[in-house]
Image: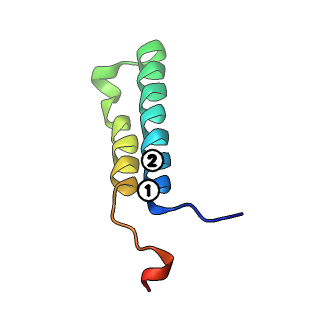
């Protein structure tokens, strides 16, 4: 299995964080209280921050 390029890894991480946020908001809206449980949305925010961090390419050393 070939490794992903840094750009592909970033895009996949942002896509995953976006869907995680959508699903969490939907779940909170459906069964919870958004005013009380909003801190759970910090999880996809943290995921997105990790996804956009600078990455070294394998050939950069």
Residue plotted at (32% across, 36% down): 39
The x, y position of residue 7, in whole percent, is 44, 56
Which residue, as the protein is rendered here, is positioned at the far bottom?
61
Give whichever of 21, 14 is nearer the camera: 14
How many numbered marks have been drawn onto this rendered protein structure? 2
The x, y position of residue 26, in whole percent, is 45, 19
Give whichever of 7, 54 is nearer the camera: 7
Q: Are marks 1 and 2 in contact (CB under 8 Å)?
A: yes
User: In which quadrant of the rendered view does residue 34 lie?
Assistant: top left
The colour scheme applied to this rendered structure is: rainbow
Q: Is residue 12 above or below residue 50?
A: above
Residue plotted at (36% across, 18% down): 33
Q: Quadrant of the N terminus?
A: bottom right
Which residue, as the protein is rendered here, is positioned at the far left?
35
Q: Quadrant of the C terminus?
A: bottom left
Density class for disc 1 (Cα within 10 Å; few <14, some 14-19, many ≥20) is: few
Which label number is shown at residue 7? 1
Q: Is residue 23 left or right of residue 33?
A: right
Density class for disc 2 (Cα within 10 Å; few <14, some 14-19, many ≥20) is: some
Secondary structure category for the residue under label 1: helix
Give whichever of 35, 49 is nearer the camera: 49
Residue plotted at (27% across, 21% down): 35
Secondary structure category for the residue under label 2: helix
Which label number is shown at residue 57? none
The x, y position of residue 24, in whole percent, is 45, 28
Which residue, as the protein is rendered here, is positioned at the far top?
30
Q: CA distance from mark 1 to mark 2?
A: 6 Å
Which residue is the site of mark 2?
11
User: In which quadrant of the rendered view does residue 36 lie?
Assistant: top left
Residue plotted at (35% across, 35% down): 41
């Amino acid at each position: 299995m070939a490794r992903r390029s840094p750009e592909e890894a970033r895009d996949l991480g942002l896509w995953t964080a976006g869907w995680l946020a959508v699903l969490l908001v939907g779940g909170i809206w459906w069964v919870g209280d958004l005013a009380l449980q909003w801190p759970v949305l910090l999880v996809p925010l943290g995921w997105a921050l990790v996804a956009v961090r600078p990455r070294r390419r394998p050939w950069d050393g």
